[in-house]
Image (cartoon, rainbow, N blue to C red):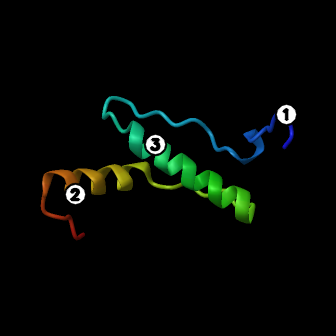
Amino acid sequence: LPPKVDLRPFMTAVEDQSRIGSCTSNSLAGAYEYLIKKSHGTNIDVSRLFIYYNGRVKRTHLPIVTD
C-alpha cells in the first residue's frame, strides 16, 4: 500500500446543514456522491433533504408525503 492516498479529486463540495441537524444525511449523501464519482467519473448531487426526510419518517412514523 502507498504511504498516503489523496481522495480529494473524487470528493464533492462541503455541504452546509444549516440549523436542521442533518449531519448524518450530509455524510451519507457525500459518501454516495464519492462512490458514484470514483466508479463512474460522474458528478451527481444527491438530495440530502430527501435522505433526512425519509430518516425522520422512519424514526417518527409520520405519514409519507405523496405529492
- Which amino acid lies under the numbered mark 2 shown in the image of this protein? Lys
Residue count near mark 3 (Cα–Cα under 10 Å), binned few <14, some 14–19, many ≥20: many
- Residue at the right extreme, as displayed: 2
Q: Which residue is mark 3?
A: 26
Q: Give whichever of 9, 4 is nearer the camera.
A: 4
Residues tagged 2 and 3 counted as in contact (Cβ below 8 A): no
Q: Position of residue 38 (x, y in %)?
A: 72, 56
The quadrant where residue 65 appears:
bottom left
**Pointer 1 or 3: first along the chain:** 1
Instruction: From the image, state whether disc 2 or disc 1 is nearer to you.
Output: 1
Residue count near mark 1 (Cα–Cα under 10 Å), binned few <14, some 14–19, many ≥20: few
Residues tagged 1 and 3 counted as in contact (Cβ below 8 A): no
**Pointer 2 or 3: first along the chain:** 3
Measured in 3D between alpha carbons, the distance from the residue under mark 1 to the one under mark 3, in whole angstroms, is 29 Å
Q: Position of residue 27 (x, y in %)?
A: 48, 42
Total labels: the figure holds 3
Q: Position of residue 30 (x, y in %)?
A: 55, 46
The relative height of residue 55 versus residue 8 in the rendered view (above or below) is below
Left or right of 35 in this view: 54: left
Label 3 residue SS: helix
Measured in 3D between alpha carbons, the distance from the residue under mark 2 to the one under mark 3, in whole angstroms, is 17 Å
Q: Residue at x 55, y 55 (%)?
A: 32
- Which amino acid lies under the numbered mark 3 shown in the image of this protein? Asn
Left or right of 47 in this view: 34: right
**Pointer 2 or 1: first along the chain:** 1
- Which amino acid lies under the numbered mark 1 shown in the image of this protein? Pro
Label 1 residue SS: loop
Left or right of 32 in this view: 1: right
Q: Residue at x 64, y 60 (%)?
A: 36
Instruction: From the image, state whether disc 2 or disc 3 is nearer to you.
Output: 2
